[in-house]
């Protein structure tokens, strides 16, 4: 019982943060599936979305029920603009140039955020219903912790339906399969790519609301870590696969959270006499997982096998 | 052949001249004047140039897209700092831990051999920093180098994060001082000659000399048969393998050497800064170096050097005014406040990335452009002569 009581809070927060990683990871995996581009700027769009919320609510005192759709719309607009300005002109350039461009955008967004905030930690506004404290099996937590996994699953089901059943979804799958042939078949790839970015940033916007409700503040670097982890989640699950990204997100979220609590869990079970300060490795673990998966199954858990053509 | 010889001589003369100029400048410029900034940014850009060239060796010449540079710099910086903190200072630095290391190279060699020994100790610590980075690169090369393009990028990026976490682990505190900074080690300003009342400062000179040696070694490597093999791998892995190049071995060599110099660059950065702290070696540092490489031109050593100079000079010096309200003749304290410099700077970088995709030098070196300019004059001259004759 002691073990259960110590583990439960970590498990809960792991599932919650996992859902948030999953939402960001979908943006990475869809863009990579179509453009073969690691969109490094995605993490910073996530951060900017949080800052937009801070400024909308605290500085311009927009009503909260208006602020949420407004912020999500602005985030989507930002994602769309980034694609049009920074990636579209490089459509025929080597893949490395596009990746460098993504890094450049990420650098620009971070510096812009640094300039506007003055580098200060901005407090994320409290969202009434989501931030309420509740008790689950005797563990105190915020309501957002419980809401996140369900919302994530719901959004993913809608997204998978969209990809499998609608015309734009079919076009997306076709473009992901073969860029040039789908162009020959009359698919307007630019609008398909824009749509991909719109969906990706929309989910990142939602993810940002959920993520920062649980965290105290927003800094210009706040997006970097969750962004990297979400990317690892996408690779872990098999890049290009939406269910894979979700699986990866939850796996990484739960593992990371358990490592944060590993010391107290192990001490409570009696394996360790004194804490080993393993919490330092909660971030690093994600990357160990990445290297392990890349070595043993480079296509990820649910990824399709790619054969090399000479 | 003759042409190549004169080219090499010109390069060596140019570098010697530059080094002499730096010695003179260092004596003329007083530390309090505004021009003192020139020396600081020269040092920093020389260090960044070493790391940028090391990254270019991997990304530009071998076609391995690695983003782990910050992690290897961190190892170099820590190794250097740990082995140069004088014994007397150790208690003050390792305030929270019982230090495990008692060895300080400059002190040990300095006691035995005087100032030559001191220099030898510092050199040894720098090289050890590079060796540690290279050794770790060798080990992680086994799994990582089998990956392709962006997978390699993300794996090395992740690896740098693992290193950063490892160095901050409290259990390693007796060696790395945990998350606390390392300080009081031998810094650049210890390089000076004291003769009676006059002191000849040599810190900028030393940095530039070290950087020149490192970059020189890398250039020699690129021009060797190994370098040609690297370029073949970059162009086409399958074709290179068919020509009898051992892919894995050459990738491993390129990776280790690049990481060695990243480690050396990290050690030099430690000498330049006052403290070493793992948290300063974030992925942003790798990205900055990548941007330098792109700015200068992927696959051009002189491009990386020029890129590093432009990047550091612009970010640290020329655009400083943008942060403090006054720049050139613009005076707008409201807009030009803290951080504006970096915004302008990153917009500039985006313009280069989008519109000048080949960077400053493309994949050509400085002599190529020098020759083109000279050719233009030589072609023009006979024409002018013909007219006179006719």
Image (tube, helix red, strand yellow):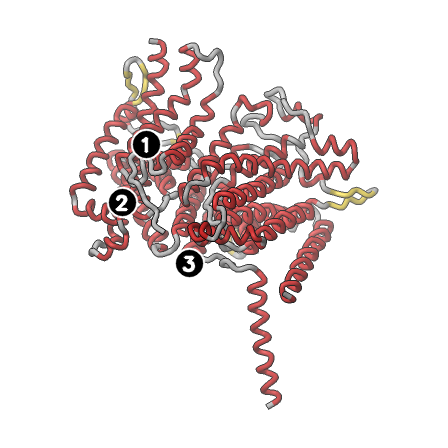
Quadrant housing residue B102: top right
Near-viewer residue (B360 or B27): B360
> What is the quadrant of residue B263 in the picture?
top right
Residue positioned 32% across, 21% down in the render: A12
Q: Is A115 located above or below residue B1 in the figure?
A: above
Which callout, 1 or 2, points to the residue nearer the camera? 1
- Relative image position of residue A187 (x, y in whole percent): 21, 54
- Residue B295: image x %, image y %? 49, 53
Residue to which mark 3 is pinned: B355
Mark 1 or mark 2: name the one nearer the start of the chain. 2
Dot 1 corresponds to which residue?
A248
Marks 3 and 1, Cα distance to the nearest angstrom?
37 Å
Q: State which chain disc 1 sits on.
A: A
| Mark pair 1, 2: CA separation | 22 Å
Tag 2, which chain? A
Circle 3 sits in a helix, a strand or a loop, which is it? Answer: helix
Residue appearing at x 39%, y 31% in the figure: A123
Image coordinates for residue B338, horizontal then vertical, percent: 49, 43
- In the drawing, what numbered circle is on residue A198? 2
Q: Is residue A236 left or right of residue B381?
A: left
Q: Are marks 3 and 2 on the same chain?
A: no
A114 left or right of B127 in image: left
Horizontal side, residue A291 vs residue B43: left or right: left
Which one is nearer the viewer's eye here, A117 or A62? A117
Total numbered circles: 3
**Going by the picture, which residue comes out furthest to the bottom?**
B390
Do the dots labelled 1 and 2 sit on one chain?
A: yes
**Whole-Å distance between the Cαs marked 3 and 2?**
25 Å
């Amino acid at each position: 019982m002691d073990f259960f009581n110590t583990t439960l809070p970590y498990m809960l927060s792991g599932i919650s943060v996992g859902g948030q990683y999953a939402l960001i990871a979908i943006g990475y995996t869809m863009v990579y599936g179509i453009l073969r581009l690691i969109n490094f700027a995605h993490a910073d769009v996530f951060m900017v979305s949080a800052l937009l919320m801070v400024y909308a609510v605290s500085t311009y005192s927009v009503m909260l029920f208006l602020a949420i759709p407004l912020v999500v719309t602005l985030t989507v607009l930002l994602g769309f603009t980034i694609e049009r300005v920074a990636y579209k002109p490089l459509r025929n350039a080597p893949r490395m140039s596009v990746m460098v461009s993504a890094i450049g955008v990420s650098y620009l967004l971070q510096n812009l955020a640094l300039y506007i905030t003055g580098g200060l930690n901005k407090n994320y506004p409290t969202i009434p219903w989501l931030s309420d404290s509740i008790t689950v099996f005797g563990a105190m937590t915020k309501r957002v912790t419980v809401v996140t996994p369900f919302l994530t699953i719901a959004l993913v089901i809608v997204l998978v339906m969209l990809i499998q059943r609608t015309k734009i979804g079919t076009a997306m799958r076709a473009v992901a399969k073969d860029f040039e042939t789908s162009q020959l078949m009359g698919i307007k790839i630019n609008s398909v790519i824009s749509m991909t970015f719109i969906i990706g940033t929309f989910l990142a916007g939602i993810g940002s609301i959920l993520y920062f409700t649980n965290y105290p503040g927003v800094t210009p670097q706040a997006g970097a870590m969750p962004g990297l982890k979400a990317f690892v989640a996408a690779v872990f699950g098999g890049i290009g696969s939406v269910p894979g990204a979700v699986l990866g997100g939850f796996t990484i979220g739960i593992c990371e959270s358990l490592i944060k609590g590993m010391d107290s869990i192990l001490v409570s079970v009696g394996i360790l006499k004194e804490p080993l300060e393993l919490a330092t490795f909660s971030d690093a673990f994600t990357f160990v997982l990445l290297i392990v998966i890349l070595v043993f199954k480079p296509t990820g858990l649910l990824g399709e096998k790619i054969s090399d053509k000479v | 052949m003759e042409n190549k010889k004169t080219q090499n001589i010109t390069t060596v003369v140019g570098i010697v001249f530059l080094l002499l100029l730096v010695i003179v400048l260092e004596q003329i410029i007083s530390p309090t004047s505004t021009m003192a900034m020139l020396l600081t940014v020269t040092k920093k850009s020389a260090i960044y140039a070493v790391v940028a060239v090391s990254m270019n060796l991997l990304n530009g010449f071998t076609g391995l897209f690695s983003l782990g540079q910050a992690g290897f710099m961190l190892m170099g910086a820590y190794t250097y700092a740990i082995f140069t903190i004088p014994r007397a200072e150790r208690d003050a630095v390792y305030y929270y831990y019982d230090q495990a290391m008692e060895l300080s190279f400059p002190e040990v060699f300095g006691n035995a051999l005087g100032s030559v020994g001191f220099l030898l100790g510092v050199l040894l610590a720098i090289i050890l920093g590079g060796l540690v980075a290279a050794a770790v690169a060798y080990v992680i090369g086994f799994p990582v180098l089998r990956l392709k393009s962006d997978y390699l990028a993300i794996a090395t990026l992740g690896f740098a994060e693992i290193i950063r976490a490892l160095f901050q682990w409290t259990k390693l505190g007796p060696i790395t001082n945990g998350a606390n900074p390392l300080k009081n080690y031998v810094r650049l300003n210890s390089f000076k000659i004291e003769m009676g009342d006059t002191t000849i400062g040599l810190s900028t000179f030393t940095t530039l000399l070290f950087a020149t040696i490192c970059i020189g070694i890398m250039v020699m490597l690129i021009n060797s048969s190994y370098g040609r093999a690297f370029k073949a791998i970059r162009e086409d892995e399958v074709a290179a393998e068919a020509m009898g190049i051992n892919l894995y071995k050459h990738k491993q060599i390129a990776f280790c050497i690049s990481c060695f110099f990243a480690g050396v660059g990290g050690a030099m950065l430690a000498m330049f800064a006052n403290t070493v702290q793992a948290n300063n070696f974030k992925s942003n540092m790798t990205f900055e170096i990548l941007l330098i490489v792109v700015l200068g031109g992927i696959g051009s050593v002189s491009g990386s050097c020029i890129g590093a100079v432009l990047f550091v000079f612009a970010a640290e010096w020329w655009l400083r005014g943008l942060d403090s309200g006054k720049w050139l003749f613009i005076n707008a304290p409201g807009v030009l406040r803290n951080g504006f410099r970096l915004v302008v700077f990153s917009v500039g970088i985006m313009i280069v990335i989008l519109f000048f995709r080949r960077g400053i030098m493309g994949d050509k070196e400085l002599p190529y452009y020098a020759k083109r300019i000279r050719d233009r004059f030589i072609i023009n001259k006979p024409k002018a002569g013909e007219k006179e004759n006719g």
